[in-house]
Image (spheres, rainbow, N blue to C red):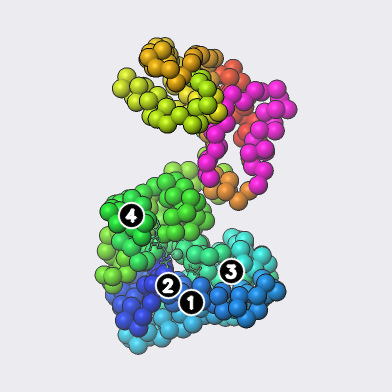
Amino acid sequence: MGIVVAKFGGTSVGSGERIQKAANSVVNEYMQGSKVVVVVSAINKTTDESIKLVKESIGDTVTSKQLAGILSMGEMQSVRIMAATIESLGVKSEYIDPFNEKWPVITDSDYLNAKIDREETKKRVQEHITKLINQGIIPVICGFLGKDLEGSVTTLGRGGSDVSAFLLGHCIDADEVVIVTDVKGVMSTDPRKLDNAEKLDKITVEEMVDLANYGAQVLHPNALRYKDPDIKAKIISFEYGDLRVHGTDIIGPAHPEDEVISIMKLNEKLSVIAVVGEDLMNKQGIIADITKKVSDNNIGIYGISTGESSITLFFEEKDAIKAHEVLHELVIGGDRLSSLSLGQKIAMISVVSHDFIDTPGIIASITKPLHENNINIVELSSSQTSVVVFVDWGDGDRAYELIRETLK
Ligand code: ADP
Ligand code: ASP
Ligand code: MG
């Protein structure tokens, strides 16, 4: 039996009955031989209510430091209730808040969006929290909160207790992190927006990070930075009162590095095709027509980007002649597209990192060394977590090395 970090979100501790259910699930896991570390958020909408109260009472003059201190009260309350409920079930438990000398999560002084000091936190977890679980005590730790080097309370940003859970899991070398929330797992979309959303059995770290970065509230986008590939993780519903229930497993990451997850140059040569036409942005269904034509001919697309008057597509070189032929049929078969060109051989380099979303200038730092070395970028596309650069095939290896150098 191993170490389990269980995080309970606000709704999961939203009433006396729910707190009891949560505590029961923790105690059951403990009785089956696991060492359990509990992380709790503020009860229900406590954080939202505190923010509203501050707005009405103090307004804009509230300082970040004051607000962090006020918001921290939510988690300070819930850990006390949770630890006492666990004790009422006959197992020793200790709540840990930032004023406790055993508090592990150390951050900088950006009070409302604090950056974690990984090394210091790891040291403290191993010094204090590991000791507690080895003594058979269940620690209950405030999610969302940190402490800076001056001893002031900080917060990790809204929804930050997911970050606390994975951070503690990483530092304590947990076997599993269990996120207990108000949905059965990660769904095909937000079930509050579409009621036919379906639960997924599993999702990769990479998919989950993109989903979270684009707004899926179910997990904080920064949480999976601390997910080690060999630590199991899942999101489950509080309803069952059982930490062993199945929800959605989070698998990976495939590339376990702290900052840049991966820089990859595709082995295959690609070819680029540009299809042009007037005012393409306002012509509906053009992309659908193009991708259907290509997929009907069993050709895969490596990249696609759209502009006012052109759509650029990247294919494997071996498919290029066929793609050129079938797309030409589409161009001459209607009057919405005017012409197309089959261009040079292309290399594709993709960079995936959790840091893109909050690192201004990251794209510039990738493109600048290419520019300085006279490497022409044929196309560049980016999402919240990845940047894909297309260059001439002959420049591919050099570009790959330069990007690796700059992001090291
Ligand atoms: P907690 O308080 O437990 O941290 P949150 O409210 O932060 O819970 O996150 C859970 C909510 O995330 C769900 O109630 C749901 O509305 C929302 N959500 C958004 N996208 C998804 C998704 N793809 N799958 C599941 N839940 C989602
Ligand atoms: N209580 C905090 C919030 O509402 C943290 C969390 O719920 O994860 O943002
Ligand atoms: Mg949340």
- In the depicted structure, whether residue 65 falls above or below residue 363: below
Q: Quarter holding the C terminus?
A: top right
* Identity of the residue drawn at 42% across and 46% down: 207
Element marked by disc 2: loop
Amino acid carrying mark 2 in the image: Gly
* Identity of the residue drawn at 56% across and 71% down: 145
Amino acid carrying mark 3 in the image: Thr
Reading the chain from its start, which is encountered first: label 1 or label 4?
1
Q: How far is the residue under mark 4 from the one under mark 2?
A: 22 Å
Residue at label 2?
Answer: 10
Amino acid carrying mark 1 in the image: Thr
Q: Quarter containing ligand 3?
A: bottom left
Q: Which mark is residue 6?
A: none
The foreground one among 209 and 250 is 209
Asked if disc 3 and disc 1 are in contact, CB closer than 8 Å, the reply is no
* Identity of the residue drawn at 27% across and 64% down: 245
The answer to whether mark 3 is within 8 Å of ligand 2 is yes
Q: Of discs 2 and 1, which sits in the foreground?
A: 1
Q: Of discs 3 and 2, which sits in the foreground?
A: 2
Crowding near pointer 2: few (<14 within 10 Å), some, many (20+)? many
- In the depicted structure, whether residue 238 falls above or below residue 327: below
* Identity of the residue drawn at 37% across and 25% down: 289
Q: Which mark is residue 194?
A: 4
Q: How far is the residue under mark 1 from the one under mark 4?
A: 26 Å
Q: Which mark is residue 155?
A: 3
Q: Which residues are magenta?
A: 360-389
Reading the chain from its start, which is encountered first: label 3 or label 2?
2
Reading the chain from its start, which is encountered first: label 4 or label 2?
2
Asked if disc 2 and disc 1 are in contact, CB closer than 8 Å, the reply is yes
Q: Of discs 4 and 3, which sits in the foreground?
A: 4
Residue at label 1?
Answer: 46
